[in-house]
Image (cartoon, grey):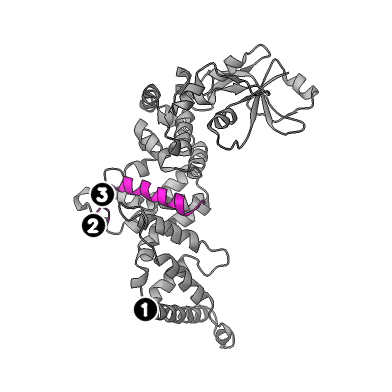
Amino acid sequence: MQTYLVGGAVRDKLLNVPVKERDWVVIGETPESMVKQGFRAVGKDFPVFLHPKTKEEYALARTERKIARGYKGFSVYTSPDISLEDDLIRRDLTINAMAMTPEGELIDPYNGQHDLEKRIFRHISPAFAEDPVRILRLARFAARYHTLGFTIADETLALMQAMVSDGEVDHLVAERVWAELLKALNEASPAAFFYTLKACGALEKIFPEIARLFGVPQPAQHHPEIDTGVHTMMCLEQATMLSSKPEVRFAALVHDLGKGITPPEIWPHHYGHEKKGLPVLESFCKRLRIPNSFKNLAMHVMEYHTHCHKAAELKASTLTDVLTMLGAFKANNTLLDFVLACEADAKGRTNFENRPYPQANLYINAAKAAANIDMSTINNSGLQGAQIGEAIRKLRIAAVASYLKKQAVP
């Protein structure tokens, strides 16, 4: 059996970054011979097997032929006579088309090592254009390796732009778009994902709600960066530094979608963008089938981020009501995620990156004060129904007022 380590494992090994998973390609075998040697078949679209001991994936060498639009429009052919080079050339980028023997010998028929050293994303063949997911994958690689200085080869960017013009990206399905977006949100520099899509024209097709933010001005005194799209990317960068949770990063990404529908005649102001953006976000999440855990936090951040920024100016009653709306008094609340996304918004502005954000602690501590009210008087009061809820609200307001008063004392 001829086996070769392939793909990301070889790439990351040469980059000296941690290898997360190892995939192998097998030459000269058949599904039947793999099973006889103890491998377990798991592939649905093409022959993939799990090693009987390591449980790593071993795929039979294969070729692919485009038969229809979209990322599923391929016919897969596998045979013992398919060479390693035949298998590697069907891959997307040169840096992903290297192989290594079990002894560590590098096999690089398409000059992937050269492009890796030069930090270049370059497609292997014109077949790159046959799969629109490759645009998303390349953008995700940009998010992962941005700090290493990778750039896109001119001819590859031109091919991606042609794919957009030809309508190939119009055939991307929601599940795959969300899967790639989620992976990008978990990368080191997710903003690079969106800048890459913008450069090839795919952002407007795939994420039009985000694309329309670019070129929309904001008041310079509050947003020295002016451009709402740039601000959004800066917020995403800040969220990435503040939290490893993709829900927080997603909330920062979409919090200003309402500014994208502001009538140009009232620019640079965006009155009421917090609520006006909610239907846009609702549609965005529905189209891409985004999980509720992401949607719910993003809705809260969109609607109440201004309330968080103005925390010290709020009345105790208003702050208490906002905390209630955020579910801050529930056992499994997301208040910390909420304030982190709001902090990302506040710091995602030119020259605001290192400013403190005391509003976060104010919200968290006010919630703690309101959650620690003495319920015994209510339990023994004989109140019923809505009266109980109003009584609890009053006690919480009093607790928040007491906390705020203490904060105001010099």
Which SS class for mark 1? helix
In the rendered image, which quarter contains the N terminus? top right
Residue 269 numbered mark, or none: none
Task: Give, as a three-letter code, the residue at label 2.
Answer: Gln
- Left or right, 59 with respect to 263, comes to right
- Left or right, 347 with respect to 180, comes to left
Question: Would residue 191 be counted in the magenta stretch?
Answer: no
Residue 408 numbered mark, or none: 1
Residue 39 placement (x, y as % from top left): 76, 27
Residue 104 placement (x, y as % from top left): 64, 24
Which residue is at the front of the view, 356 or 40? 356
Which SS class for mark 3? loop
Image quadrant in which you'd find residue 109: top right
CA distance separating discs 3 and 1: 34 Å
Q: Badges 1 and 2: C-beta atoms under 8 Å apart?
A: no
Which residue was labeled with disc 2? 221
Range of the magenta residues? 216-244
Mark before the other along the chain sequence, 3 or 1: 3
Residue 407 placement (x, y as % from top left): 40, 77
| Residue at the image point whose x is 35% and y is 62% from the top | 306
CA distance separating discs 1 and 2: 27 Å
Question: Would residue 222 be counted in the magenta stretch?
Answer: yes
Mark before the other along the chain sequence, 1 or 2: 2
Mark before the other along the chain sequence, 2 or 3: 2
Which SS class for mark 2? loop
| Residue at the image point whose x is 35% and y is 58% from the top | 274
Residue 226 numbered mark, or none: 3
CA distance separating discs 2 and 3: 9 Å
